[in-house]
Image: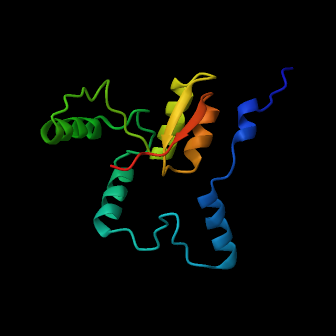
Amino acid sequence: MVALSLSKRSARIEQAEIRAMSIECEKAGGINLAQGVCDTQVPLLIGENAHRGIENGINSYSRFDGLVELREAIAQKIGLYNGIDADPETEIVVSAGSTGAFYCTCLALLDPGDEVILFEPYYGKSREHASCGGGGSCLRHPSAP
């Protein structure tokens, strides 16, 4: 029988400071202003459309690169507004969030010893994600304009 163990890179993964603060805030019964936590009601139109989607059987994972309709709309928008010609099938990816997208990008593209330049200010987890991807981090402060 093969014994499973965590990778060596997993030892570098830590709870995000912002999430740790949210946990402490919950324990203290405080009001969390740090993590984009929303305590307002879901707008009626959003709830109705979510319900309609469930009723129509739209309840499985989408493609890894996002819904085709959204990627096509993004391609159209950046073409009209930015003059960028992008193929929604091969050049546009939609993710659930920038943190996960950056982490996956680092894992996909970085090899041990690769250098990553992070411009400050940057999200605290970015340095960890870059190093978990195998790259080293080189921090650089942007010069004043």
* Residue at the limit of the structure toward the left, as seen here: 80
Q: Is residue 111 above or below residue 131?
A: above
Q: In this image, 88 relative to 61: left or right?
A: left
Q: Position of residue 138 (x, y in %)?
A: 56, 35
Q: Quadrant of residue 72?
A: top left
The residue positioned 43% from the left and 45% from the top of the image is 142
Instruction: For the N terminus, give its image quadrant.
Output: top right
Q: Can you see residue 7?
A: no
Q: Position of residue 25 (x, y in %)?
A: 64, 72
Residue closest to the eye, 15 or 50: 15
Residue closest to the eye, 50 or 56: 50
Q: Quadrant of residue 110?
A: top right
Q: Position of residue 107 (x, y in %)?
A: 56, 29
Residue closest to the eye, 114 or 92: 114
Q: Can you see residue 22?
A: yes
Q: Position of residue 143 (x, y in %)?
A: 41, 46
Q: Is residue 47 above or below residue 130?
A: below
Q: Is residue 8 above or below residue 61?
A: above
The residue positioned 29% from the left and 26% from the top of the image is 89
Q: How many marks?
A: 0
The residue positioned 29% from the left and 34% from the top of the image is 68
The residue positioned 15% from the left and 34% from the top of the image is 83
* Residue at the limit of the structure toward the front, as seen here: 144
| Colour style of the rendered protein structure | rainbow
